[in-house]
């Protein structure tokens, strides 16, 4: 007969506290905004513009991240070389940077007065105060989420499969496309979901680097901030939409993965 | 619920309990001041003097006046509210959230351009291709900008509005975009231009266009330190902070 210990109680309490803390603000958003308000606020052209812009810039930035991040992560995961740990740290650094630092950094790098500002301008590319600038900001803050997860996913692939394909005469490119990507797919999708969520929620770097203009640079988080002081109801409604979209992304990823890649969606 | 969200988002100003328990005479009290972003340099320079004189700690929070007002409406624990207009303090006062507002300074609304810019008038801003950055409609600087633009001939107003590339949440955003070279022109207060140390230059507007910019402050009704708050507001018209405001280029109250 085992005595019920104190430890399980501590565990249970911790989980209860964590759950309450994490869900309360989200629940409050839905309690404070009635479904009628929500629909009404979406009828407002500014809100729709913000949603459209957010989805468009996020989609473009995720496309760039997948296209460049996947081969880069594969290379990092399958080679070992001196200074690799340092390289990994550099790639992960934006994860822990405050958005304001990301904004300042982007301005200093590719802003009009930045070190590469002249080059960007000479190439005829307009970043600051333009939609392209939003994409740059989103890509900067979101890509480490994907690359990091992708490196882990590629590193976890059983190499015998890949080696077998190579012995059978397949090129590395073919092995990468036909073996590595399909096997690592659940991890890649999980990384993409994290990057997507981060890109959708990006605020500080976008405001500092790209500014805020309806339909051009004002994404949903910026629109929420813009409405916060004068139209709190409308800000709440837009927040609710963002919560719903983000939740939908997370859920669909878990469903696509059949429930176990992100850790047991269905009860065992 | 709403207040909870704001407290979570705005770490400064609320959250940790400002009530330090007893109230011993030698225990420093803490005053929370929410002031318009355009006063950042002036208030920061005089706050230490006030702290010394009153044996209290002053916590400053600078942002767009509209945002600060929204925080007070959401129940943020603030003692003093100093805004870049009279409308917002008047509104809060009529909602019984703020004491009778005191007008304590004026500012000059100007066109700001980078130090080496060729733009020297509002006409220059109306030219096609000029990148203009202004305050968003809800913040005083943005409201003044729209008031001023409405006084222009309709065609010119339209041309200028077509050049707007960003609606910034406060004057800091406008000044930052100008200093970074992201924009060619912006409408701010002359004190903001003075604070850039020559990186930007101010272009005066014709008197008939220039909106009257008056700053007003009051003690928040639910202030944890109402008495000290009152002294801080008084100090905006005479004392260290009044001097600092004058030094930064603010004019006397009308």
Image: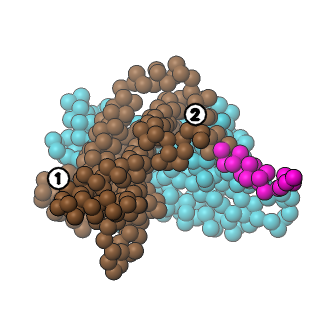
The residue depicted at 77 percent of the width and 53 percent of the height is A8
Residue A267 placement: quadrant? top right
What is the chain letter for disc 1?
Answer: A
Frontmost of labels 1 and 2 is: 2
Question: Residue A200 at x, y = what percent?
Answer: 40, 43
Please name the residue that numbered disc 2 is placed on.
A29
Query: Which residue range is magenta in the image?
Result: A1-19
Q: Is residue A233 above or below residue A223?
A: above
**Residue A141 highlighted magenta (yes or no):** no
**Which numbered tag is attached to residue B101?**
none
Question: What is the secondary structure assignment of the residue under circle 1?
Answer: loop
Q: Nearer the viewer, residue B14 or A189?
A: A189
The residue depicted at 64 percent of the width and 39 percent of the height is A24
For label 1, the crowd category at 10 Å Cα-Cα, with few meaning under 14, some 14 to 19 and many 20 or more, is few
Please name the residue that numbered disc 1 is placed on.
A125
Question: What is the secondary structure assignment of the residue under circle 2?
Answer: helix
Magenta part, dominant SS: helix
The residue depicted at 20 percent of the width and 30 percent of the height is B155
Of the image marks 1 and 2, the number of the one nearer the N terminus: 2
Chain letter for the part of the structure drawn in brown: A
What is the chain letter for disc 2?
Answer: A
**Distance in Å between CA atoms under marks 1 and 2:** 39 Å
Task: Please state, as top left, top right, bottom left or bottom right, where the C terminus of chain A lies in the image.
Answer: top right
Chain B colour in the picture: cyan
Asked if marks 1 and 2 fall on the same chain, the answer is yes
Q: Is residue A69 above or below residue A212?
A: below
Q: Nearer the viewer, residue B16 or A157?
A: A157
Q: Is residue A81 above or below residue A185?
A: below
The residue depicted at 70 percent of the width and 67 percent of the height is B53
Q: How many marks?
A: 2
């Amino acid at each position: 007969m085992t005595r019920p210990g104190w430890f399980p109680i501590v565990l249970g309490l911790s989980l209860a506290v964590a759950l309450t803390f994490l869900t309360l603000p989200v629940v409050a958003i839905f309690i404070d905004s009635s479904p009628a308000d929500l629909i009404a606020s979406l009828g407002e052209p500014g809100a729709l513009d913000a949603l459209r812009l957010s989805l468009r810039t996020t989609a473009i930035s995720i496309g760039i991240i997948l296209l460049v991040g996947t081969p880069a992560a594969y290379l990092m995961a399958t080679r070992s070389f001196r200074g690799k740990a340092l390289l990994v740290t550099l790639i992960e650094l934006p994860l822990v940077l405050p958005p304001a630092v990301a904004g300042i950094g982007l301005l200093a790098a590719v802003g009009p007065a930045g070190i590469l500002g002249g080059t960007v301008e000479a190439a005829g590319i307009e970043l600051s105060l333009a939609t392209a600038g939003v994409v740059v900001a989103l890509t900067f803050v979101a890509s480490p989420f994907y690359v990091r997860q992708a490196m882990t996913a590629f590193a976890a692939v059983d190499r015998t499969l890949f080696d077998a394909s190579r012995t059978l005469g397949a090129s590395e490119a073919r092995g990468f496309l036909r073996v590595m990507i399909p096997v690592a797919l659940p991890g890649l999708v999980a990384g993409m979901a994290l990057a997507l969520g981060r890109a959708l929620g990006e605020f500080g770097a976008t405001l500092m680097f790209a500014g805020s203009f309806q339909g051009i640079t004002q994404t949903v988080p910026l629109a929420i901030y813009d409405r916060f002081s004068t139209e709190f109801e409308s800000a709440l409604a837009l927040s609710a939409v963002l919560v719903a979209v983000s939740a939908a992304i997370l859920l669909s990823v878990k469903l696509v993965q059949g429930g176990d890649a992100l850790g047991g969606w269905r009860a065992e | 619920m709403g207040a909870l969200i704001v407290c979570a988002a705005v770490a400064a100003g609320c959250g940790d309990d400002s009530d330090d328990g007893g109230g011993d005479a030698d225990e420093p009290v803490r005053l929370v001041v929410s002031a318009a972003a355009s006063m950042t340099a002036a208030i920061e320079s005089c706050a230490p003097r006030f702290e010394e004189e009153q044996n209290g700690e002053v916590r400053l929070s600078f942002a767009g006046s509209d945002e600060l007002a929204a925080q007070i409406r959401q129940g943020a624990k603030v003692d003093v509210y100093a805004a870049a207009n009279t409308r917002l303090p008047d509104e809060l006062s009529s909602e019984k959230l703020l004491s009778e507002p005191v007008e304590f300074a004026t500012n000059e609304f100007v066109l700001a351009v980078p130090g080496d810019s060729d733009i020297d008038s509002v006409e220059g801003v109306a030219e096609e291709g000029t990148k203009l950055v202004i305050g968003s409609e809800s913040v005083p600087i943005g409201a003044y900008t729209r008031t001023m633009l409405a006084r222009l001939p309709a065609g010119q107003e339209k041309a200028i509005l077509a050049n707007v590339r960003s609606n910034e949440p406060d004057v800091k955003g406008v000044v930052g975009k100008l200093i970074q070279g992201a924009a060619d022109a912006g409408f701010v207060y002359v004190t903001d231009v003075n604070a850039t140390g020559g990186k930007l230059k101010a272009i005066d507007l014709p008197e008939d266009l220039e909106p009257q910019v008056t700053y007003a402050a009051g003690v928040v009704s639910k202030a944890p330190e109402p008495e000290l708050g009152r002294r801080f507001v008084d100090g905006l018209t005479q004392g260290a902070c009044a001097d600092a405001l004058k030094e930064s280029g603010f004019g006397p109250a009308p």
